[in-house]
Image (spheres, coloured by chain):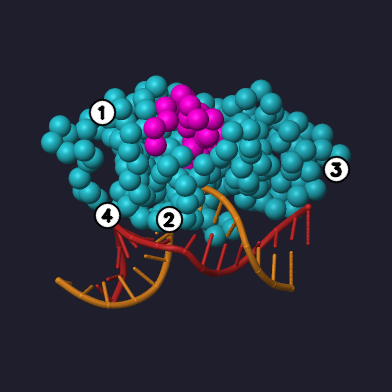
Chain colours: A cyan, B red, C orange
Amino acid sequence: MPELPEVEAVRRMLERATRGARIDRVELRRPDLRRPFPPDFVSRLTGHTIQSISRRGKYLLATLSSGDTLLVHLGMSGAFRTERRRASSRISPPADPHDHVVIALSSGVVVTFNDPRRFGLMDLIHANHDHAALRGMGPEPLDETFDALVLARACAGKRVAVKVLLLDQRLVAGVGNIYASEALHHAGLSPRRRASTLATATGTPREAAFKLAAGIKAVLQKAVAANARAYESGRFRVYEREGKPCARRGCRGTIRRITQAGRSTYFCPACQK
DNA sequence: ACGCCCACCTGGAGGC
DNA sequence: TGCCTCCAGGTGGGCG
């Protein structure tokens, strides 16, 4: 469940479950996810302590006592679960064929990474180095560094539909297909609108840029506060609500689904202009 | 640089 | 029951 709010919920869970514990054992059940694990992956994790878990966009970063950072992306279907180690076995049994990585901690907690589609990613970043995946990533949408001005500058001159541009992690980090639709609905903007219409030619924000920046912050903030439980409860305003009435107060529109850049977009033609 | 398309991989849902 | 097609929340490479 991997857009910013879902990744943030995973971060909180992992931080509670792993912080301060030493990695006693790492088991790779296959040689790769989306890409192969680095050759020294297991040895560079084993014996080191997890100091903190942070997040950048949709990436999780575990800072280790060695100075290395474990980088994780959940892809489309990646998930972590944690459990107390069984007294009888050193490591949890291979219950699921998609349990690809099993990490046993000194605390007795076992962390398992499960990912059926295997679009996930794990890599190690050496101390004081950066990583190609994080280079060029846009600002955190919930930081003050992200606002209408930043958004407008990124939109200026772009002919692409604004919804498609929102999926570009170089513009803003962590927005995916669900929250792109939700943010545009919140802002009352059509997903089909050209990105360039949010800014003047020189990148000065128009009214729509203020609305969209606020919409992105509002939907993400709300989802983070709810610990990203909206997906399970189906509590979105437009996402997967094709044919249902628009949830906006006073709007009599019906939610439509269209395809943009090969992905589903949901919106209300009546109140999103 | 930009915008578009496709591939990566598995599983679930729905049609016939 | 089975077989087919389509769809899914992400990313990145390649093409014109």
Q: Which amino acid does label 3 sit on?
A: Ala
* Disc 4 from disc 3: Cα separation: 53 Å
Which numbered disc flags the more N-terminal residue, 1 or 3? Answer: 1
* Disc 2 from disc 3: Cα separation: 45 Å
Task: Identify the secondary structure beneath mark 1.
Answer: loop
Which numbered disc flags the more N-terminal residue, 1 or 4? Answer: 4
**Region in magenta:** A46-72
Q: Which amino acid does label 1 sit on?
A: Gly
Task: Identify the secondary structure beneath mark 3.
Answer: loop
Identify the image quadrant of the N terminus of chain A: top left
Question: Which one is in front, A248 or A240?
Answer: A240
- Residue on which disc 4 sits: A97
Q: Which residue is drawn at 46% across and 39% down?
A: A44
The residue most toward the right is A202
- Residue on which disc 2 sits: A32
Which numbered disc flags the more N-terminal residue, 2 or 4? Answer: 2
- Residue on which disc 3 sits: A201
Q: Is residue A133 above or below residue A84?
A: below
